[in-house]
Amino acid sequence: ILIVYQAIYRPLSYIANFSSEQITKIKDVIVANAETLKIALSDGKYMGSELDMANIIHSNKAMFESEGIMTQNIPDFDLFGVNLGDAPSFYSWLIIIPVLVFVAQYFSSKLIRKMSYQPVQNNGGCAMWVMDITMPLMIAFMAFTFPAFLGIYWIFQSILGVGQQFLLKKLYPYPTFTEQDYRDAERAMRGKGPKGPSGTRTLPSGKTYRSLHHIDDDDE
């Protein structure tokens, strides 16, 4: 996620592959045209981020191209007229992104847990419920403070995580055992079941299992 964060906040360096000299030249153009661009300077210097600079360039391509700055490789975060490089706010439809992040994170964790093997835990329901709420809330808060593009990344990450777990469940299904199988296994563990080769035992139902004490016998 740090790589995605760096790519979003420093698109000129990581995506457009601009050198430090080229970035300095872009700042000089912004300073020279600060009044036209309506950019506030600090002691005559431009203090904005590379993401801000990329947004300025896309809004004024002709100005920067006339100064010899190539704008083709600079990423454009606009989607349907809305800049995904901006942080979500209550005054933009981008506010739905943190909401979708929370929903995607919450239900993806539920679905992934449902499709994964979970050992039986006593008195863990309350802690699990708190974790199911707090983690999505934390990520949703981060999506509210970071650029909206990062929130979209989290949404797709949640969807792909569920899809990956679904494929793993289909490709490698968990074995199912009946109550009789469990009782037979308990009897076999007490030494009442017939032993097979290499530390295996055969249950009365005909199924075999292997003791972990002999798991490395074949490697010898």
Image (cartoon, rainbow, N blue to C red):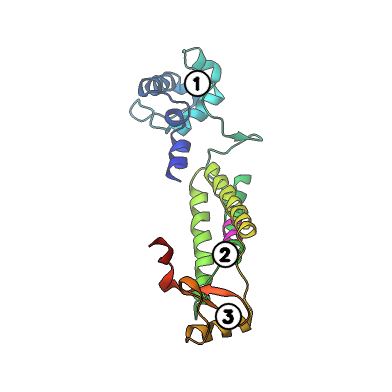
Q: Is residue 153 above or below residue 138?
A: above
Q: Nearer the viewer, residue 213 or 127?
A: 213
Q: In terms of secondary structure, where does tag 2 sit?
A: loop
Q: Residue at x 42, y 29 (%)?
A: 13
Tag 3: residue type?
A: Leu
Tag 1: residue type?
A: Thr
Nearer-N-terminus badge (3/1): 1
Locate the C terminus by quadrant: bottom left
Q: Quadrant of residue 17?
A: top left
Q: Is residue 108 magenta-colored?
A: yes
Q: In terms of secondary structure, where does tag 1 sit?
A: helix
Which residue was labeled with disc 1?
36
Q: CA distance from mark 3 to mark 1?
A: 84 Å
Which residue was labeled with disc 3?
203
Q: In terms of secondary structure, where does tag 3 sit?
A: loop
Percent position (x, y) of residue 112? 58, 61
Secondary structure that dominates the magenta span = helix
Q: Label 1 near label 2: C-beta < 8 Å?
A: no
Nearest to viewer (mark 3 / mark 1): 3
Badge 2: residue crowd in 10 Å (few <14, some 14–19, many ≥20): some
Residue that extends furthest to the right in the rendered view of this protein = 80
Badge 1: residue crowd in 10 Å (few <14, some 14–19, many ≥20): few
Which residue was labeled with disc 2?
116
Nearest to viewer (mark 3 / mark 2): 3
Q: CA distance from mark 2 to mark 1?
A: 58 Å
Q: CA distance from mark 3 to mark 2?
A: 26 Å
Magenta residues (range): 103-109
